[in-house]
Image: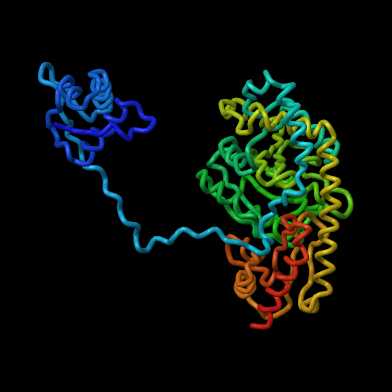
Amino acid sequence: MLTYSFETIGSCSMYEHLYRCIQEDIRSGRLKANEKLPSKRSFARHLGVSVITVENAYAQLLAEGYIYSLPKRGFFVEALPPAPSVQAPCESAAPAEPTQHWNADFVTNQIPPENFPFSTWTKLLRNVLSQEGKNLMQAPSAQGCRELQSAIAHHLYAFRGMQVQPEQIVIGAGTEYLCGLLVQLLGRDAVYAVEEPCYQKPAKIYETCGAACVSIPMDKDGVRLDALEASGADILHLSPSHHFPTGIVMPVSRRLQLLHWCAQKQGRYILEDDYDCEFRTNGKPIPTLQSIDTTGRVIYINTFSKTLASTMRISYMVLPMPLVDAFRDKLGFYACTVSTFEQLALAEFIQGGYFEKHLNRMRNHYRTQKSAILTQLSESAIAPKISVLMEKEGLHFLLKVHAPVSDEALLRCAADREVRISCVSQYYRGTPSCPRTIVVNYAGLSTEHREEAIALLIDSIAAAIAQA
């Protein structure tokens, strides 16, 4: 008869321990298919447990299909198919890449912890918990909490001169999510266009959602209108106030031409990605394309990931009024992907003036940061071999290397020193261009390690030039 020990069952109940023992014997094949199990009473006497223990164990095995019962005959082991074997990994499969440690990272804009307003945010979270208890339990609409919609609308008017209604605003967990919603709203049959070069995620999102995506080459003023016309595009995704990675600021003449392109055909829209407009360090922010749109064809999108923290996945878009009802009819069944808790805290952060103070502090910080970086570069040994481009805009600038060196060599020499960089050529979907131009994102550098990071960058470039 089956024998099991109950001496080391830990916190398990006796019936659960017995159930697991029998289950393991069935799965391992020690108990064969259709083999009869002991009767409940004789099994209980043999094990020295109560009949109810055996009864409960059999009941669980029966419920899960490990055994079956026949009237007046007892319980029997079910015939189970063999468990699938674990296959060895394919020899050609690439091993998982280990997490890379970087001594300096000029690719990501992950904000250092010392720049986040922890004390203010903690206070506001407490306020929300104590004052908004009932509201926290209510699910917001698909477009988000009214409080945050109103706060964003007020901020856009004060900071960007945009006159929008709260109901035009849709809040979501990141720009990527909002781009996916737009494909569902505007249709997969539309042709989506991105700038060339560009940040690659939007194009990948459009294609993953099943939409066609084309790249539009740029000149010194932004996307070329002739290429846009020839592409057959319906939706144009662009960053007119500070293009990434080139840093181009689109002049008003090109903006008006693009608005005219939109108006020529029904169903055309421009998605204006204003990702780092808050950090123009010289002069006033560039007016938005949305603010001069009179035909309701510009969808404005922005994020708090650049201003507060990259891990704060809160973005928003402003729909033209004609699309608001369409969004509610077509996508209103969605649940908002940002928690009510976070939305109400952020609304207080904006309405209480904390956001404006934070932006002013960060502008001063980045202005000081960039000045120190440019000074260090200008005083370095490689200064005659480099030039700085687009340093007056946003949170990155370009570093042009005037030497017969390849982008691959620049990347390799940087990686040898555990310095992470990217080149403009890497942001082309088609044939790469603009060689020997490094994109320097400096927002993620801490003040403490800034000088060391720039010294490593200088050393990497010097090494690549020496090898050329």
Q: Is residue 173 above or below residue 149?
A: below
Describe residue 274's horizontal placement relative to residue 196 as left or right: right
Image coordinates for residue 408, horizontal then vertical, percent: 60, 73
Pick the front one: 338 or 423? 338
Q: Residue at 61% of width from left, 42% of height from top?
A: 179
Image coordinates for residue 154, horizontal then vertical, percent: 82, 32
Q: Residue at 59% of width from left, 35% of height from top?
A: 185
Whether residue 89 is visible? yes
Pick the front one: 126 or 45? 45
Describe residue 212's horizontal placement relative to residue 272 as left or right: left
Residue, far top? 72
Describe residue 100's horizontal placement relative to residue 117 as left or right: left
Pick the front one: 395 or 153? 395
Q: Is residue 417 above or below residue 360?
A: below
Q: From the image, which quarter does the N terminus lie in? A: top left
Q: In the rendered image, which quarter is residue 106 located in?
A: bottom right
Q: Residue at 66% of width from left, 48% of height from top?
A: 237
Whether residue 468 is visible? no
Q: Residue at 72% of width from left, 59% of height from top?
A: 441
Q: In the rendered image, which quarter is residue 434 located in?
A: bottom right
Image coordinates for residue 256, horizontal then vertical, percent: 78, 48
Q: Is residue 99 above or below residue 416?
A: above
Image coordinates for residue 402, horizontal then vertical, percent: 74, 77
Q: In the rendered image, which quarter is residue 170 located in?
A: top right
Specify how the rendered protein is coloured: rainbow
Q: From the image, which quarter does the C terminus lie in? A: bottom right
